[in-house]
Amino acid sequence: MMKKLFWLAAAAAFLLCVQVARVYAHHAFGAEFDPNRPVLLKGPVTRVEWINPHTWVHLEHVDDKGKKEIWMVEGGTPNSLLRRGLKRDSIKIGQVIIVDGYQSKDRTNRANGRDITLPDGQKFFMGSSGTGAPYDQPGKDQRKY
Amino acid sequence: MMKMKSPVAAAFLLFVSSLPGAGPRTSEGKPDFSGLYDIASLTPLVRPKALGDRLTLTDAEAEAVAKQEAALSAATNRASDPNRKAPPAGGDGSLGPAGNVGGYNSFWVDRGKGAFKIGGKWRTSILTDPADGQMPELTPLGKQLAAKSAVRGRPNRGDAFWITENLNPGPYDDPELRPLAERCLLAFGVSAGPPMLPVMYNNLKQIVQTKDRILILNEMVHDVRIIRMSAQHDPPEIRKWLGDSVGHWEGDTLVVDTTSFGDSLGLDRASRNLHVIERFTRLDDNTLSYKFTVDDPTIWTRPWSGEVAWPKTDQRLYEYACHEGNYSFTGILKGARMLEADALRKAGK
């Protein structure tokens, strides 16, 4: 039992170290988005930009006063979409999504996609179950771990 | 295919290439490292302090690491409350690059599923020297520079602290003060290297090997390192973003020596006096060992070394045209200007 606890402690320490160490990404979201401007957006997808360094999903949101506005939500690198088996037409225009995040500091209608889900709460971007992506094919991924 | 001088030579080459772990060879008889590699791994550069001097994990520990990562991934993929509200005002407390506003769904992150193995043993850190797996001490100048760049890592409160605290220059004063990655230059720190180490995503490398040149293409930001074989270094007044790399073979090990960096480098903290030696060796048919030694006496009080496994992959490497839509950079700079205007208004200026 003690031994098992040690393994778990070692695993937790290890992963924490990775969280802190793997900070190399395109940019820190903290530089771009304002923690004092939280947003909850809901509406149909109007456009998807598959561009580097980050994907942007546009949606039509209706604000508290009933005014329609287009927001852009920042996702990750489109290379991840490809590797996880998504194609351009996997993301349907008109699909209603819910996004929570923070508005950009420049106060345009941009936010980070802190959590992007379908109306029932399921994640909009999921790992690629059943899509035939490399991740789904045991033995195809030559890493042995 | 080379022309065989004699059946004996052909038989010899056939024999050598059939040795366990020998892998394919070029027509010159050198190991042929050409191919695609995905170096994503959970093994961190610096060892968790709790593991002390231990370089390796037991199988059970490695399994626990992989299981915890899988559980974390499953948890973050679970459905959210469809009736959730906006996240808390003032920030969600997230640390690191998520900077108090959260990152994005884990779908986008590809940092590996477990630790990597060298010689059948799971590694606790990429660093192998110093033996405690920790970075060596910085020189006084190194400490001074580190303190200066720490301004960028200040917690994000959504205010222009550099105005209220009179910091000059402020971290957003000039586009060239921003990190290279934000500016789409070099591949997000240590991804382009040298040394080339795992990052959060897009960890693919492609090696293309000829007799005189060995090229390493990094997916991000499609940087290509061109290693000139058996060549002299360019004169030191010629400075390069990725340094000047020359290579030679020591038996079946490819040794790459890189100097002549400019003032902007992939390796965090390093200076233009950086000198990196890398050693590529085949571990088995599907894995290379990538060893490196970093020497920069301007920044660190002693050299440091490490090792990473480079597993082959059958995934595809995709284009990464970073300037294609780098909206975030203009957003970051414009956002800083607006926060500054707020701070000045508040101060009645």
Image (spheres, coloured by chain):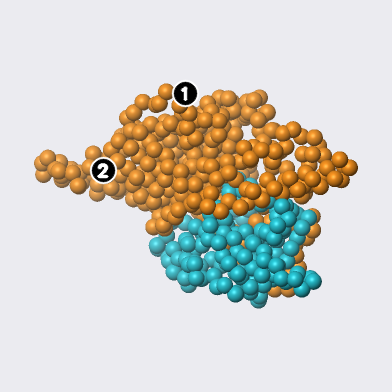
Chain colours: A cyan, B orange
Q: Which quarter shows the N terminus of chain A?
A: bottom right
In the picture, measured across the screen, residue B286 lies left or right of residue B135, that is: left
Q: How many marks?
A: 2
Q: Nearer the viewer, residue A134 or B215?
A: B215
The spot of residue B91 in percent (x, y) is 76, 55
From the image, state whether disc 2 or disc 1 is nearer to you. 1
Q: Circle 1 sits in a helix, a strand or a loop, which is it?
A: loop
Disc number placed over residue A88 in the picture, else none:
none
Residue shown at 64% from the left, 62% from the top: A72
Residue shown at 53% from the left, 61% from the top: A50
Residue B63 visible in the current orientation: no
For badge 2, the amino acid type reads Thr
Q: CA distance from mark 2 to mark 1?
A: 35 Å
Q: Nearer the viewer, residue B188 or B203?
A: B188
Subunit under mark 2: B
In the picture, measured across the screen, residue B141 lies left or right of residue B127, that is: right
First along the sequence among labels 2 and 1: 2
Q: Is residue A54 above or below residue B281?
A: below
Q: Which residue is mark 1?
A: B237
Residue B244 falls in image quadrant? top left
Q: Which residue is mark 2?
A: B26
Q: Residues within 10 Å of mark 1 (few under 14, many from 20)?
A: few
Subunit under mark 1: B
The spot of residue A132 in percent (x, y) is 44, 69
For badge 1, the amino acid type reads Glu
Q: Is residue B334 above or below residue A57?
A: above
Residue B209 visible in the current orientation: yes
Q: Nearer the viewer, residue B142 or A115?
A: A115
The spot of residue B321 in percent (x, y) is 49, 51
Residue shown at 59% from the left, 31% from the top: B136
